[in-house]
Image (spheres, rainbow, N blue to C red):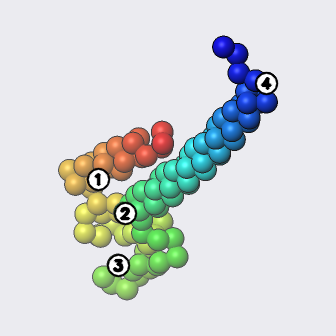
């Protein structure tokens, strides 16, 4: 009932080729998904920073024409303050944290 040695080696070789190809494809997919997750985490973090204070290169001024005082040029009289306070800011911060918590483990 034993197969000839040549046939066994041929089947083993073809099995190894398939296993190596499958492992390579799996690793390539893993790398692509990790890059996508990193890009998503960066986008969420960048948008959260923008929502808080604006882009660093933008200089805002208050209604009297004076340059802004804080990061991103926020002034004390800005609508909602710097980073928009109140319940809306708490909900926004919660959603940013939740988004990062879901996309970082990817």
Kindly identify the residue that appears in the image at 29 percent across and 70 percent down.
77
Q: Which residue is mark 1?
A: 92
Sequence-wise, the earlier of marks 1 and 2 is 2
Q: Is mark 3 in CB contact (under 8 Å) with mark 4?
A: no
| Front in this rendered view, residue 12 or 98 | 12
Q: Is residue 91 placed above or below 67 in the rendered structure?
A: above
Q: Could you give the CA–CA distance between mark 4 and mark 2, rounded to whole angstroms?
A: 69 Å
Sequence-wise, the earlier of marks 1 and 4 is 4
Q: Is mark 1 in CB contact (under 8 Å) with mark 2?
A: yes
**2 left or right of 76 in image:** right
Sequence-wise, the earlier of marks 4 and 2 is 4
Q: Could you give the CA–CA distance between mark 3 and mark 4, rounded to whole angstroms?
A: 85 Å
Question: Local crowd at mark 3 within 10 Å, few (<14), some, or many (≥20)?
Answer: some
**21 left or right of 85 in image:** right
Mark on residue 5? 4
Q: Could you give the CA–CA distance between mark 1 and mark 3, rounded to whole angstroms?
A: 24 Å
Q: Could you give the CA–CA distance between mark 1 and mark 2, rounded to whole angstroms?
A: 9 Å
Question: Local crowd at mark 4 within 10 Å, few (<14), some, or many (≥20)?
Answer: few
Q: Is mark 2 in CB contact (under 8 Å) with mark 3?
A: no
Looking at this rendering, what residue extends furthest in the left direction?
Answer: 87
Sequence-wise, the earlier of marks 3 and 4 is 4
Mark on residue 62? 3
**SS class, disc 1:** helix
Q: Is mark 1 in CB contact (under 8 Å) with mark 3?
A: no
Q: Which residue is mark 2?
A: 51
**18 left or right of 59 in image:** right
Looking at this rendering, what residue extends furthest in the top direction?
Answer: 1
Image quarter of residue 82: bottom left
Image quarter of residue 85: bottom left
**SS class, disc 3:** loop
**Pair 1/3: label in front:** 1
């Amino acid at each position: 009932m034993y197969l000839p040695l040549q046939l066994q080696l041929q089947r083993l070789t073809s099995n190894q080729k398939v296993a190596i190809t499958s492992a390579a494809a799996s690793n390539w997919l893993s790398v692509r998904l990790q890059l996508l997750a990193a890009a998503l985490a960066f986008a969420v973090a960048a948008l959260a920073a923008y929502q808080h204070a604006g882009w660093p290169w933008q200089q805002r001024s208050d209604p009297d024409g004076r340059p802004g005082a804080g990061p991103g040029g926020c002034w004390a009289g800005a609508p909602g303050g710097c980073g928009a306070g109140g319940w809306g800011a708490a909900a926004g911060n919660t959603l940013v944290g939740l988004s990062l918590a879901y996309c970082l483990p990817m």
